[in-house]
Image (cartoon, rainbow, N blue to C red):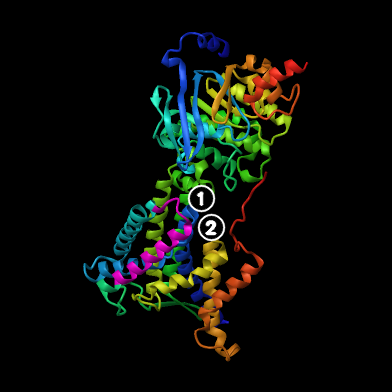
Amino acid sequence: MTRFIEFALAGLAQGFVYALVALGFVIIYKATEVINFAQGGLLTLGVYLVYNFTSGQSVPFPLAVVMSMIVTAGVALLFERLVLRRMLGNPVFAQVMVTIGLLFILQNLVIAIWGAEPLNLGDPWGISTISIGEVIIEVRDLWTAALAIGVLVVFFLFFRFSKLGLAMRATAVDQEAALAQGMSSRQVYMAAWGIAGATAAIAGVGVAAGATGVSPSVEFVALLAFPAIILGGIDSPLGAVIGGLIIGVTQSLTAGYQNELFPWLWAGFDDVMPFIVMVLVLLVRPYGLFGTPEIKRV
Amino acid sequence: MNTSMTATNNAPGTDADVVLSAQGVEVVYRDVLLGLRGVSLEVKRGSIVAVLGSNGSGKTTLLRALTGLLDVHRGKVTKGSMQFEGQPLERRDPASIVRAGMAQVMEGRRIFPALTVDENLRTGAYTVRSKAQIRENYDRVLSLFPVLVDRRTSTAGYLSGGEQQMVAIGRALMSSPTLLLLDEPSLGLAPLIVEQIAGIVREVNAQGTSVVLVEQNATMALSLADHGYVLENGRVVKDGPGAELLADKDIQEFYLGVGDAGRKSFRDVKTYRRRKRWSS
């Protein structure tokens, strides 16, 4: 039982990381209907920036994260402003391809600047643990969960109560009608990319604090977050979180028990499991768990 | 208010009396398709102006040209000029036009179905800065549409058609516009609800907002309007005071279903009438 709880908790922590990654995808998709494949690249950039600030300039860790959020958001904004803005009105497919281009640019840029060797993030959590009864919990897991929940609360408050948040939701539903209310689509797109960039930096910290460390493979975790997005419903922030948690726990439990329960499975099956869960959910709910099929009444 | 305004209607229009005017506006879609072929119209302050026309006559295009929404449809104003409150309207973005005091209710209502009624209304006040002003407008809208008071937290997409239209009109009023454009507010609504909407338009107008009412329901529109325009094929083919148009034989045949049916275009009227005279 203790083992199960430990696996589940580790899974939840990993799930929160997926949720953070997924939120970045969702917010851009909601505003622009573009699946931003560069999100993984932004994640990597964010992580290396944190490393850069903590190691080189020896900035305190929390401040380094904030600085990284600002710079990553700036890069995302710049990309939106310089490239995607000019592609508005073109097929979404073309815009998605451009984001794949950005992914490769960021990937190579990061390796060119910092090299491909794994580095130390410089986070204050290390491998310290606390134990409640017999259950051992890693401190960094607690922090990732807290960060993710914090981001979620900010998201929720922003979308529910701020004017820009309302404009983003309205634009996502009906761009022309939103324009007719005097909302600016440009502002909304920029906000979406900026927020996705900042979120990517935090998500990156969550990823790199774990087993991955600061290495270019941070980006692949973003791919593992994909089932979470599809599972939760690509236009639903809440879905992204629930989807992330489901995927995280599934993965962690698979990794923990596959040897004793299904010894014939190959190693690394835990990376496949999320996709199997995704397919099963999509068979039953094609829009994902929380995705909205259009509400329409004529 | 209306009667005092109609008195000034006949006086030579000084600029302050005219909220909106357009001269010879031509609109081209995607560089090839003519949407409007030179439309002129004028809206006197405090009046209701009806714009009639069948499908594809250019009514909605006219509204898009006025509100800066042509871009979205790859349309451009290629000739003519438009003024709102004395300021030119060309090449202005929708936001600045809303801020200047022109709001519209789009065809097919176009409320945000996934948002609540309350949120839908708040989107209409996006350009309003003062919180006190927003609250005042909000209260005014709810007093105009008491039905919506209990529906504030409902998802707007699940409301009935009539209620959705009220949300759409309320949303437009949230920016406290001096000119309200309505695109077919009666579309797809039951006659009783259409009457209700007409009453609301009259009340909004009585509170001091000028109105442009684009409609296919000519009886409703002309019974409200001080002045009416008939659009066909992107041109104004007839205009005159509402009551006069309502009594007009051709309009009656075309839009009110009185008299013989079967003609396809307003432009056929003259020859048709001639033929009718001869054959009788």
Drawn side of residue B268 relative to residue B105, left or right: right
Q: Quadrant of the C terminus of chain B?
A: top right
Cα separation, mark 1 vs mark 2, equals: 9 Å
The answer to whether the residues at label 1 and label 2 have Cβ atoms under 8 Å apart is yes
* Farthest front residue in view: B278
* Farthest left residue in view: A57
Q: What's the magenta bit mostly, secondary-structure-wise? A: helix
Mark before the other along the chain sequence, 1 or 2: 1
Q: Nearer the viewer, residue A294 or B174?
A: A294
Q: Which mark is residue A172?
A: 1
Mark 1: which amino acid? Ala
Q: Is residue B54 above or below residue B40?
A: below
Q: Residue at x 39, y 34 (%)?
A: B92
Residue B72, percent across and down? 47, 43
Chain under disc 2: A
Q: Residue at x 54, y 38 (%)?
A: B121
Residue B191, percent across and down? 73, 30
Residue B148, percent across and down? 63, 35
**Labels 1, 2: one chain:** yes
Crowding around mark 1 (Cα neighbors within 10 Å: few <14, some 14 to 19, many 20+) is many
Chain under disc 1: A
Drawn side of residue B55 relative to residue A218, left or right: right
The magenta segment = A87-110
Residue B8, percent across and down? 50, 9
Q: Secondary structure at mark 1?
A: helix
On whether residue A88 falls in the magenta region, the answer is yes
List the residue tagged with mark 2: A235
Q: Quadrant of the N terminus of chain B?
A: top right
